[in-house]
Amino acid sequence: MKPRTRARAIALQVLYETDLSSHLPGDVLKTRLEDTALNEELADFARRIIFGVLPLRHELDQIIAKYAPEWPLDQIAAIDRNILRIACWEFAVYRETPIKVAINEAVELAKVYGSESASRFVNGVLGTLVDHENEILQLVTENIPQGTNLES
């Protein structure tokens, strides 16, 4: 697994665990970093993803639901939902990851962590979302909680 893919995988694991439990993301990240050594730059990248996605989960979910209406959010597996959140955040909010890279990385994570058909599902949903990149950024920035830093 490529280094930045490993950082995304750590972020995915943290987001997935915090999605399904009341565990604190900082504690979960600390445990994951003890289990998987990442250099400081990659650990920081994972941190940026986690703390970039967490305050925007609701908004990202609304966007996913809007542009993938045939897949109600409550029917999307938690792991797939978090992969979609990460990719959507990367290309529409963080904007330092090229769109094709964000999609390819999401598909790779889906192959490793999702079901047999997860990679095709993730690719299809992100293919739809990509056409609305600027609208996604606008929706997210209009609805973010006051004081949230999109660059974190």
Image (cartoon, rainbow, N blue to C red):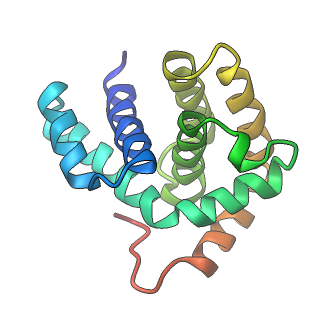
**Relative to residue 67, is residue 10 drawn left or right?**
left
Q: Position of residue 81 (x, y in %)?
A: 60, 42
**Relative to residue 133, is residue 40 drawn left or right?**
left
* Whether residue 35 is situated above or below residue 112 in the rendered picture: below
Labels in figure, total: 0
**Relative to residue 58, is residue 72 drawn left or right?**
right
Q: Position of residue 100 (x, y in %)?
A: 62, 34
- Quarter of the figure with the C terminus: bottom left
Q: Quadrant of residue 92?
A: bottom right
**Relative to residue 33, is residue 103 drawn left or right?**
right
Q: Nearer the viewer, residue 105 or 113?
A: 113
Name, please, the residue furthest toward the front. Answer: 21
- Quarter of the figure with the N terminus: top left
Q: Nearer the viewer, residue 51 or 151?
A: 51
* Whether residue 2 is situated above or below residue 128 in the rendered picture: above
Residue positioned 43% across, 59% down in the render: 54
Residue positioned 45% across, 67% down in the render: 55
Residue positioned 17% across, 38% down in the render: 31
Name, please, the residue furthest toward the right. Answer: 70
Q: Position of residue 89 (x, y in %)?
A: 54, 53
Q: Position of residue 12 (x, y in %)?
A: 42, 38
Q: Nearer the viewer, residue 113 or 108?
A: 113
Residue positioned 85% across, 50% down in the render: 69
Name, please, the residue furthest toward the bottom. Answer: 146
Q: Quadrant of residue 58?
A: bottom right
